[in-house]
């Protein structure tokens, strides 16, 4: 676990009260379709490692 993760408080839905008002689509099939296609698009990007230089910049900013 990086220093960045250790120093951040865990966020809960109380931190984002507006999100509770958002309801999922009425059609669960659409929700599944959308989730599947969004994962196909963005999972490869999210799985890329964070460049070490960026991590160093963020760690320096926290000090």
Image: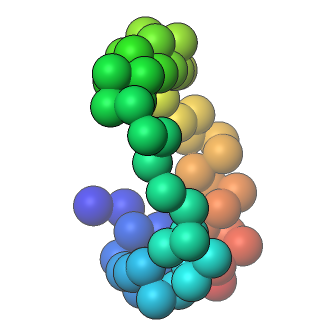
**Residue 53 percent across, percent down from the top left:** 65, 42
**Left or right side of 30 for 54:** right
Q: Residue at the location (67% across, 69% down)?
A: 60
**Residue 46 percent across, percent down from the top left:** 47, 29
Q: Quadrant of residue 59?
A: bottom right
Query: Looking at the picture, does residue 39 appear above or below residue 58?
Result: above
Q: Residue at the location (27% across, 61% down)?
A: 1
Viewer-closest of 29 and 51: 29
Viewer-closest of 56 and 9: 9
**Left or right side of 18 for 49:** left
Colouring convention used in this rendered image of the protein: rainbow
Q: Residue at the location (56% across, 71% down)?
A: 21
Q: Quadrant of the C terminus?
A: bottom right
Query: Looking at the picture, does residue 57 appear above or below residue 59?
Result: above
Query: Looking at the picture, does residue 52 appear above or below residue 37?
Result: below
The reply to whether residue 39 is visible in this rendering is no
């Amino acid at each position: 676990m990086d220093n960045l993760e250790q120093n951040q408080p865990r966020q809960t839905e109380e931190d984002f009260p507006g999100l509770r008002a958002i309801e999922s689509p009425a059609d669960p099939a659409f929700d599944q379709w959308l989730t599947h296609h969004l994962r196909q698009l963005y999972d490869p990007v999210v799985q890329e490692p964070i460049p070490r230089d960026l991590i160093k910049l963020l760690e320096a900013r926290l000090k």
